[in-house]
Structures are given as structure tokens and as C-alpha cells.
Image: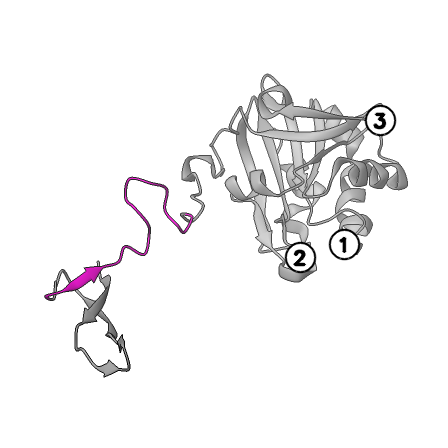
Amino acid sequence: MTCGFVCELHHPKVVGVHREKAVSVCKQNHTFLSGSKQVNFYGNTLQKPIFPKPRQINLMMIISNGSRFPDDVTFTTLQEGQVKEMKASEIFNGKKVVIFGVPGAFTPSCSDKHLPGFADNFDKFKEKGIDTVICLAANDPYVMNAWAKQKGVEGKILMLSDGSGAVLEELGLSVNTGNFGGRRARRFSAYVENGVVKNLNLENGTSFTEVSAAERVLSQIG
């Protein structure tokens, strides 16, 4: 690792009654100059660093076919006007669940194609023994509830929120949309049985194709 040093070179130069020091900055690998002072740019090693460490992603949480939804991750939903937290264990354990992720409530492709596809096939999912059909997005639960009312799926499809998008990122299901909307859900659909992902259909970004469509996941349920 390259360390930074500030070297104070003592070359006295009389200007009135003042004495100047020539200061130079150098990068050396474990080189100490006479009269030099090492500067630790990351602070005292016995204290917290001046600069925060980059946020670490827990690779064990990234889901794929055959992996298990982490039991302790938490989503929110709106029930009877109150925000309720729901852990993944409550949502998935002992159940057959279809879940799909959308980049944003009220956005064109999500409203006109993705959500309606699961609403239209809701009865078919039930016939195949699905306990819950879930729509997940990085919107707040009030927005998700208003969207459900507008699309007529309230009481059918469980609308889950990951407001900050942090859980979606940990699961490997997020995409950064920049100034448009920050961190959002990457478009996907999945069939989950007793917490285990049986089939994950992941789109390449936020675009909607048949990859994450309701018909695709419906065909994957035995």
C-alpha cells in the first residue's frame, strides 16, 4: 500500500522575524526522510476512520434458483390504514408464493402490462395452489396501496414496499436509475416455495418482456 507523507524540510530563510518552512508532499513506500512527519490520512488506527468504509454487500443474501430468502429481511405494507412490517419468514415460510418486482408504481409498463398480467392470472395461480401473489417495489406503502386501489387489485395482490431499496440491493434485485428515481427494483418474477426460490426470472434492467411476465412464472409452477 502506498502511504502519504508530508515532509517538512527545514531550510531557514529570514524574512523579518519570521522563519519559513518549505513543505513538500511525496508518496513513498515505507520511506522515512530525516525530519519528516508521517500523516495518517485515515485517522488514528485506534479510532474510527475519518472516511467511512464503503458499504459491504452480503453476498450470502443474493438470491438465485435454489437459494433461500433470508428470514430476517423486512418489508412494509399498508393494512387498514396502518403501516405494518413483515419479515420474509412470515411471508414465505410454509407457503407457495409468486412474487414480482417492478421499478415503480404508476409507471407505464408496470401499470399497463406487468401488474395487470398478474391480476388477470390471479385465479390461475390460486388453482395451482399459490397462497400469495406479491408485488414488490421501492415505493412507500401508501403509494403502493393507492396504486393497488387504482388498478383494482386491493385484497388480491399483496403490495410490499422496500422504501429505501436496501433489501432489494442486498438480494441482488436492484438497479440504480440515477436522477430518475435512485435505487429501484430490477424487474423480475419468481416462484418461491417454503422460502426457497424455485424459479427466478430476472430482466436485464427495468424493461418489461415476457421474461418476467405472469404467464412465464405460471408455466413454471408444477
Mark 3 vs mark 2: in front:
3
* Residue 175 x, y percent position in the rendering: 58, 52
State yes or no: discs 2 and 1 in contact (Cβ < 8 Å). yes
| C-alpha separation, residue under disc 2 versus residue under disc 1 | 8 Å
Q: Quadrant of residue 192?
A: top right
Left or right side of 63 for 168: right
Residue highlighted by disc 1: 109
Comparing 54 with 8, the one in front is 8
Q: Earlier in the sequence, mark 2 or mark 1?
A: 1
Q: Residue 37 colored magenta? A: yes
Comparing 88 with 92, the one in front is 88
Q: Earlier in the sequence, mark 3 or mark 1?
A: 3
Residue highlighted by disc 2: 207
Q: Tag 3's secondary structure?
A: loop
Which residue appears farthest toward the front when viewing the image?
17
Q: Tag 2's secondary structure?
A: loop
Q: Earlier in the sequence, mark 3 or mark 2?
A: 3
Range of residues picked out in magenta: 34-52
Q: Residue at x 56, y 29 (%)?
A: 73
Q: Quadrant of residue 28?
A: bottom left
| C-alpha separation, residue under disc 3 versus residue under disc 1 | 27 Å
